[in-house]
């Protein structure tokens, strides 16, 4: 590993992530250990550790490192957690989730992005994952509830079908709203019929495919 890469990675953690109130030791360790440069398209490799979103195709982008870290800290992923990720993207967040939890099921709408993420994850030697191609706007069919769900695209309003896939005590990260007012939100399932929500920070994120045309309105 080149010294320049290590310096850039150190600066990403110390100058971007920590100042954004990310102090969880396991999250900081994961951001240090998972090689972000392996998940960035070759044309943008020099931007791997910068405070910017990076295009990966199909009008999709990698989140800024500080947003990824805040997401992980809010979800408080435990080593035994079963995780659902909606929107695989480059596979970098998938790798971070897999490093912190027991197993990640990740769904990507675009087949070529899923294949590229699979290649990236293989290079990074991340194995406790299962990748699928499909539309997870309303969750993903499964026989078991998830402890953690990370939604990497935004939605105008809450998605009850996704929330129903949380186990009791499960946590969901999702960005709600429409530009220019969007808020990263943590949804926690308290019981069969009750959830709590906590606004975390303001940010902007591209919508999930179909979310703009099929919002769920609450009355």
Image (cartoon, grey):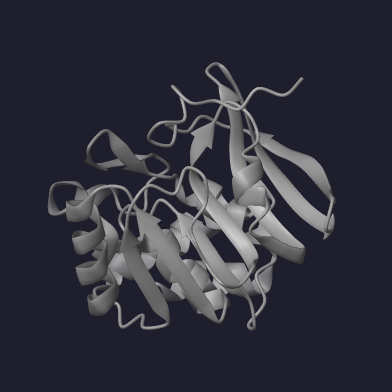
Percent x, y for residue 138?
52, 45
**Direction top: furthest residue:** 180
Left-right relation of 44 to 185: left
Left-right relation of 122 to 28: left
- The answer to whether residue 50 of the structure is visible from this angle is yes
Percent x, y for residue 141?
49, 61
Foreground of the two, 117 or 27: 117
Left-right relation of 112 to 203: left
Residue 88 figure quarter: bottom left
Percent x, y for residue 19?
63, 49
- Please tell me which residue is depicted at 33% across the width and 41% down the height of the picture: 61
Percent x, y for residue 133?
29, 57
Quadrant position of the N terminus in the picture: bottom left
Left-right relation of 185 to 63: right
Quadrant position of the C terminus in the picture: top right
Q: Is residue 3 above or below residue 196?
A: below
- Please tell me which residue is depicted at 79% across the width and 42% down the height of the picture: 198
- Please tell me which residue is depicted at 44% across the width and 49% down the height of the picture: 136
Q: Is residue 116 above or below residue 210?
A: below
- The answer to whether residue 35 of the structure is visible from this angle is no
Q: How many marks?
A: 0
- Please tell me which residue is depicted at 24% across the width and 48% down the height of the picture: 110
Foreground of the two, 41 or 52: 41
Q: Is residue 98 above or below residue 139?
A: below
Foreground of the two, 42 or 79: 79
């Amino acid at each position: 590993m080149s010294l320049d890469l290590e310096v850039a990675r150190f600066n990403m953690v110390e100058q971007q992530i920590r100042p954004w109130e990310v102090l969880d030791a396991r999250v900081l360790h994961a951001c240090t250990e998972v090689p972000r440069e392996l998940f960035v398209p070759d044309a943008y490799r020099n931007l791997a550790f910068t405070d910017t979103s990076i295009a990966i195709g199909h009008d999709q982008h990698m989140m800024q490192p500080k947003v990824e870290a805040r997401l992980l800290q809010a979800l408080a992923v435990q080593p035994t957690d079963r995780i659902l990720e909606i929107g695989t993207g480059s596979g970098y967040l998938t790798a971070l989730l897999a490093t912190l939890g027991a197993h990640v099921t990740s769904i990507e709408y675009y087949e070529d992005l899923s294949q590229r993420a699979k290649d990236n994850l293989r290079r990074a030697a991340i194995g406790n994952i299962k990748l699928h191609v499909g539309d997870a706007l309303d969750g993903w069919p499964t026989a078991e509830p998830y402890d953690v769900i990370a939604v990497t695209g935004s939605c105008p309003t809450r998605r009850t079908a996704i929330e129903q896939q949380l186990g009791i005590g499960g946590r969901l990260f999702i960005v709600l709203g429409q530009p220019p007012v969007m808020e990263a939100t943590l949804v926690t399932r308290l019981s069969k019929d009750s959830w709590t929500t906590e606004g975390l920070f303001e940010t902007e994120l591209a919508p999930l495919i179909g979310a703009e045309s099929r919002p769920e309105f609450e009355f």
